[in-house]
Image: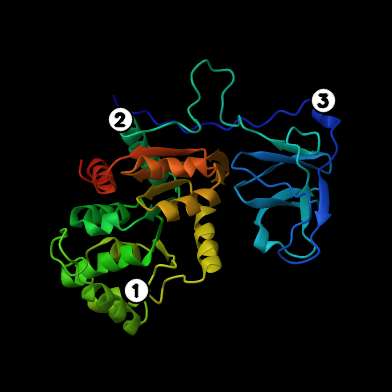
């Protein structure tokens, strides 16, 4: 049965007379950059409202590990969601630990639940998944979500491990998805990009024409990074060498934002790699703030990092809507780890990530 896509509707909180009696949220100014006041309110992934100048204001893009900075200018009340390290002296931080409205703070967990409907809510939280789970419906849903995003100027972010680049067919499948408008940003590490470019230039991965269990050689891996850095950047190298295959070349041709974040394990990185962790976070957040769908495939550390900075909802084209999140891995541990870390809205799929990308490609690009 085909999945019929319908964007979940947001039902704003209706504040009755009881909430009129509650005080405005308490605001305390930051005294030193990067240091929050004691008793700060830590935000969640749920929609949250704050009472400012007797108005209940929805904080857009509420997410984990952040604080609420109130703008209390009369007639222009809003709440900015700010990471601790980005607090500036003079910022007015919301202080309080009660979330029922009694301190001017209300955490709203039912924003996408239609209470007038007897049907199960279409926007669910923390659904247990295992390798025994049938994922046919999830695939059908994702196909329609991606079609919707493409047709309605959504913003799709992919988070990739190295698995997709290790297989020629999955690498080509991802390249076609990029070419056909199903990706706006890609987060990954140095290896995912190096493997892709190594195959495009040398027709090898870790020195092999076929990826086997035998002893690998790394010469071509480092050689491709050398050559790219010698030219200056990935974009300049692809244009100079006329690279046509692989997802990296497709991303360059289609102006897809490629965010390469370095790790402590990297021995050698591209000039394009963000080796400063805060700079990497900032660039990832710049894209996540625009994202309407996030697909995270076989990259557990990048997945957890991305999941924790992704709100469960966003305002896209003037509409409050959920941010669709999919996390894909062959290990149940990997996909369940994200929900354990506080990201409640990600739909998990326990499957081979190479097959996953090829299935998406076959349905969207080859029908």
What residue lies at 38% left-to-right and 53% top-to-bottom?
299
Marks 1 and 2, Cα distance to the nearest angstrom?
41 Å
Vertical order, 43 against 250 (above or below)? above
Query: Residue 17 — which label?
Result: 3
Q: Position of residue 357 (x, y in %)?
A: 28, 47
Q: Position of residue 160 (x, y in %)?
A: 36, 55
Tag 1 residue: 234
Asked if the residue under mark 3 is in contact with the one under mark 1, i.e. CB atoms within 8 Å, the reply is no
Q: Is label 3 in a helix, a strand or a loop? A: helix
Marks 1 and 3, Cα distance to the nearest angstrom?
59 Å
- The residue at the far front in this view is 215
How packed is label 2: few (under 14 Cα within 10 Å), some, or many (20 or more)? few
What residue lies at 34% left-to-right and 73% top-to-bottom?
235
**Location of residue 191 (image quadrant):** bottom left
Q: Is label 2 in a helix, a strand or a loop? A: loop
The answer to which of 50 and 278 lies nearer the viewer is: 278
Q: Earlier in the sequence, mark 1 or mark 2?
A: 2
Query: Residue 132 — which label?
Result: 2
How packed is label 3: few (under 14 Cα within 10 Å), some, or many (20 or more)? few
């Amino acid at each position: 049965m085909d999945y019929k896509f319908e964007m979940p509707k947001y039902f704003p909180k209706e504040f009755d007379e009881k909430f009129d009696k509650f005080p405005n949220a308490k605001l305390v100014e930051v005294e030193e950059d990067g240091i929050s006041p004691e008793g700060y309110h830590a935000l969640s992934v749920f929609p949250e409202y704050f009472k400012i100048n007797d108005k209940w204001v929805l904080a857009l893009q509420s997410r984990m590990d952040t604080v609420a900075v109130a703008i209390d200018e009369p007639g222009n009340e809003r709440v900015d969601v700010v990471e601790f390290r980005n607090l500036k002296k003079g910022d007015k931080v919301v202080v309080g630990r009660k979330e029922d409205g009694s301190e001017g703070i209300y955490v709203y967990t039912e924003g996408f639940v239609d209470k007038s409907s007897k049907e199960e809510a279409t926007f669910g939280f923390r659904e247990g998944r295992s390798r025994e789970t049938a994922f046919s419906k999830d695939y059908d849903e994702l196909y329609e979500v991606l079609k919707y995003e493409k047709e309605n100027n959504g913003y799709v972010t992919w988070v990739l491990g190295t698995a997709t680049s290790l297989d020629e067919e999955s690498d080509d499948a991802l390249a076609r998805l990029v070419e056909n408008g199903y990706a706006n940003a890609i987060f990954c590490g140095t290896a995912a990009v190096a493997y892709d470019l190594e195959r495009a230039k040398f027709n090898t991965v870790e020195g092999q024409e076929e990826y086997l269990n035998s002893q690998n050689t790394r010469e071509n891996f480092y050689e491709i990074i050398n050559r790219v850095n010698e030219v200056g950047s990935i974009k300049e190298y692809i244009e100079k060498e006329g690279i046509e295959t692989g997802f990296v070349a497709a991303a360059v041709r289609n102006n897809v934002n490629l965010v390469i974040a370095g790790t402590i394990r990297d021995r050698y990185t591209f000039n394009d790699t963000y080796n400063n962790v805060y700079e990497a976070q900032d660039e990832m957040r710049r894209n996540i703030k625009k994202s309407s769908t996030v697909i995270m495939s076989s990259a557990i550390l990048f997945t957890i990092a991305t999941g924790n900075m992704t709100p469960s909802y966003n305002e896209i084209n003037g509409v409050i809507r959920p941010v669709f999140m999919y996390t894909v891995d062959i290990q149940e541990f990997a996909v369940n780890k994200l929900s354990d870390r506080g990201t409640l809205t990600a739909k998990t799929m326990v499957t081979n990530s190479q097959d996953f990308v090829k299935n998406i490609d076959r349905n969207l690009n080859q029908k």
